[in-house]
Amino acid sequence: MAKKIGHVVTEKGSTLGAKVETPQERMEKIKKALKDKTLPVLSISISERHFNGPTIDPAAETEFGKIASECGFRLADAKSDSKPDVEIAGEALSQFGMRKGNLISCKARVEIKVREKSTGNLLFVDRQTSVAVDLTEQIAAKTALQNAAAELAERILPKLGK
């Protein structure tokens, strides 16, 4: 019986589980959707809170900005010479999920609003929840926030090109 199962897993292993998109595949998909489009200058501000301790750095904001920048968007903040055309603002939270042996899981949720700066019109509202596992709670929380932001970027950024 074990030999039969091993044979099936070997032959059909790629169809037995969900395909996980790599960061490079996600980036290429966004770049392809934005090809030959004019991209606005973005400002990104996503505040974060982890329920079991202070948040040291903005994982969701950093990930969203990294992806936007790598896809050709220019970024602006309060210290920039250029002014943003589009403002992405939101809030994110993460929380301890469970511990299994040495592994810790955390769950995170990122919510954003995308607003046209010149008119104040709200262009999009979206949210994403994600889970991550690591050896430390803070890194699991940051990774969950990063994953949620990446999924949001994949949905939102292609809509911003004109």
Image: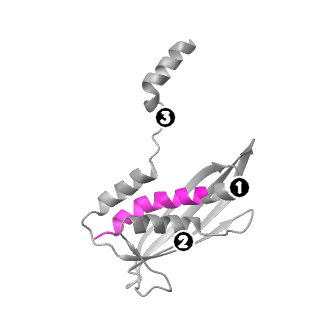
Contact (CB < 8 A) between labels 3 and 2?
no
The local crowd at label 1, few if under 14, some if 14 to 19, many if 20 or more residues have their Cα within 10 Å, is: many
Residues rendered magenta in the picture: 143-162
Alpha-carbon span between mark 2 and mark 1: 23 Å
* Left or right of 89 in this view: 144: right
Q: Position of residue 128 (x, y in %)?
A: 52, 58
Q: Magenta residues: mostly which secondary structure?
A: helix
Residue on which the image places disc 3: 17
Question: In the rendered structure, does residue 147 fall within the stretch colored magenta?
Answer: yes
Residue on which the image places disc 2: 90
Against 45, residue 103 (above or below) is above
Q: Earlier in the sequence, mark 3 or mark 1?
A: 3
Identify the secondary structure beneath mark 1: helix
Q: Which mark is residue 18?
A: none
* Left or right of 72 in this view: 109: right
Residue on which the image places disc 1: 137
